[in-house]
Amino acid sequence: MTSEVLYNGDLRTTCTHLKSGSHFETDAPTDNNGKGERFSPTDLLATSLAACMITVMGIKARTMDFDLNDVKIEVLKKMAADPRRVSGIDLKVHIPENLAVIDAKTIDILKRTGYTCPVAKSLHPDIEVNIEWGAWG
């Protein structure tokens, strides 16, 4: 087993990673009867894309003898109705100055690595993903 999810009532869950014991809570969003005080499950879906992309890009950078410290990705989740679902994810990548000057070939390798992360490959093709790469164009 990977994790367990406990329903706490009031549209909130506690998610526990079984190997580490690490946990966090989710909450239903305010536009769906919740308090919106925590990540919603659909927030986690969109955020997982950014986390997965930067993780595999970090692995690739490490094999190329540098790191991606301080790269930040802002995430905007877009919802659709009927059926209620995530319809789009916009990512805005912020590249620190020391990484803005790496060569075009390395940037291309990192971008391709990000585009092919496991979460990206698991998303339904109807989810429109837009990525603004900032200094990496």
Image (tube, rainbow, N blue to C red):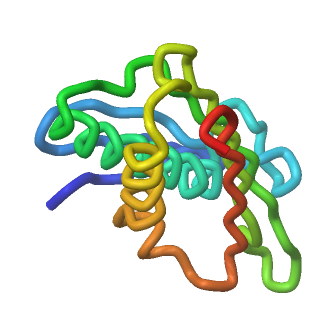
The residue positioned 79% from the left and 75% from the top of the image is: 84
Q: Nearer the viewer, residue 121 or 110?
A: 110
Query: Which quadrant holds the C terminus?
Result: top right
Quarter-wise, where is residue 102 in the image? top left
| Residue beneath the point at 70% across and 41% down | 92
Q: How many marks?
A: 0
In the rendered image of this protein, does residue 98 appear above or below residue 11? above
Q: Residue at x 68, y 84 (%)?
A: 126
Where's residue 44, x and y in %?
A: 55, 49
Question: x, y percentage for residue 103?
Answer: 44, 37
Look at 67% across and 47% down and name the residue there: 91
- Measuring from the top left, give residue 55's x and y in whole percent: 34, 42
User: Is 90 or 133 nearer to us in this picture?
Assistant: 133
Q: Is residue 95 left or right of 77 when viewed as pictured?
A: left
Q: Is residue 19 left or right of residue 79?
A: left
Residue 59 x %, y %: 23, 42
Rendered position, 91 above or below 116:
above
Whether residue 122 is visible here, answered yes or no, is yes
Q: Nearer the viewer, residue 37 or 137?
A: 137
Is residue 95 depicted above or below 73 in this figure?
above
Which is more toward the observer, 80 or 118? 118
Q: Is residue 108 above or below residue 83?
A: above
The answer to which quarter of the image holds residue 72 is top right
Horizontal side, residue 50 vs residue 6: left or right: right
Image quadrant occupied by the N terminus: bottom left
Is residue 10 something one can see in this rendering? no
Q: Quadrant of residue 130?
A: bottom right
